[in-house]
Structure formats: C-alpha cells, structure tokens
Amino acid sequence: MGKNRLEAFSDGVIAIIITIMVLELRVPHGTEISELFSLIPVLFSYALSFIFVGIYWNNHHHMLHASNTVNGYILWANLHLLFWLSLVPFVTGWMGENHFAKATVALYGVVLFMSGLAYYILSQCLVSLNGKNSTLGKAIGHDRKGIISLFLYASAVALSFVEPTIALAIYIFVAIMWFLPDRRIEKQIKMY
C-alpha cells in the first residue's frame, strides 16, 4: 500500500488543527496596546501548541519519508495520532483562557502525553512493517528520546497539580528536545 494518501490526509488534518487554533484567538475590543496584555496567556498557549503541532508534522513527514510502505494497522495508528492532535486546539484554548489553572495545564499535558504515545505507537508499527534493518528501523532504534518524552509528560501532568509553571517548563523542555527534525532519520536517509 502506498504512503502518499496517508501523508496527504495527515497534512490536511494538521493544517486544519493549526487553523482552528488561530481562529480561537479573539481580537481585543479596545484600541490600546495595553488591551493585548490580557491576551498574553492565550497567545503563549497558542504559540506553544503551534510549535508542538509543527514538531509532530515535521517529524511525521520525516518518519513517512523513511518508510517504504504502510498497511491497515499503520492507517489506524496514524488516525490514533491525529485524534489526539485534534484535541490540541481545545486544551490550548481552555488553558489560555483560564490563565494556566492547574486542571487545564494537567489536561493539556494528558493530550501531549497521549499524542506522544500515539506517535510512538505509529513509529513502532512502521518499524515493524518496514523491518528493523530498514532506514526507519535503523534511525529510530529503541527510541529513547520518545520514551523520555513520555516520562517527562507524565511527570508534568502530576506536577501540574502542585505547580503549573513547573509543568509548563517541562512541556517547553520537551518541545526544545524535538524542535529540529529528528536527525536520526536524516542521517539514515543520507546513507542511502
């Protein structure tokens, strides 16, 4: 089964997710610059989520580029990932509108954790189908980076009930870890 339709569908869904997030930004009613200050939590939430969705899009592209084929299991694993990513606009808006209240930061982390888990499952399904000696299999290996990210997300969810700013700092740290495309895949692709 070809991977082009999967990639095109995923690109479309991710573009819609980003569009929904930006449509949730509300214009202030006043004309003074000071009116924007009340929007800082919302703008920060949007920027953080935009970066996360962009990271998933970028790494998803690289992962599919390194894969030769997909099957029905991959299609469902990909839908699983897209489901969790589609919840990002909701939790982003809720967190920003409520100025990073504990429950909102926790739910945001749950969605990030589940998105990370879904990405991990998708990557493992692709490696299983394409083989451990495939370009993707050699690049991902045991995926320590993905497992560390899941551990950090889970820790942040728990910490969000104690101090939401610590949880946000962890979310930012994970985003920094993944900001650039996964170099492991790029290195393997250059070898071929």
Image: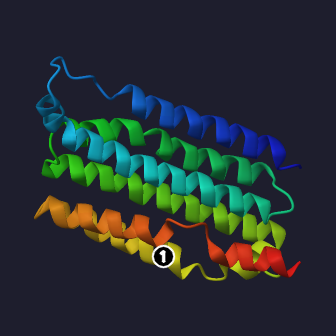
Q: Which residue lies at the image location 73% right of the left edge and 79% below the top edge?
A: 187
Horizontal and vertical percent position of residue 87: 42, 40
On screen, 139 above or below 27?
below
Circle 1 Cα neighbour tier, 10 Å, few/some/many (<14 / 14–19 / ≥20): some
Horizontal and vertical percent position of residue 98: 15, 39
- Where is the C terminus found, in terms of image quarters? bottom right
On screen, 98 above or below 191?
above
Helix, strand or loop at disc 1?
helix
| In this rendering, position of residue 185 left or right of residue 13 | right
| In this rendering, position of residue 115 left or right of residue 110 | right
Front position in the image: 115 or 36: 36
Q: Which residue lies at the image location 28% right of the left edge and 41% below the top edge?
A: 43
On screen, 30 above or below 70?
above
The answer to whether residue 134 shows anywhere in this view is: no
The answer to whether residue 152 shows anywhere in this view is: yes
Front position in the image: 128 or 39: 39
Which colour scheme appears in the figure?
Answer: rainbow
Q: Which residue lies at the image location 35% right of the left edge and 42% below the top edge?
A: 46
Which quadrant holds residue 94?
A: top left
Horizontal and vertical percent position of residue 48: 36, 51
| In this rendering, position of residue 17 left or right of residue 187 | left
Under mark 1, the amino acid is: Ile
Per the image, the residue denoted by label 1 is 147
Horizontal and vertical percent position of residue 122: 64, 60
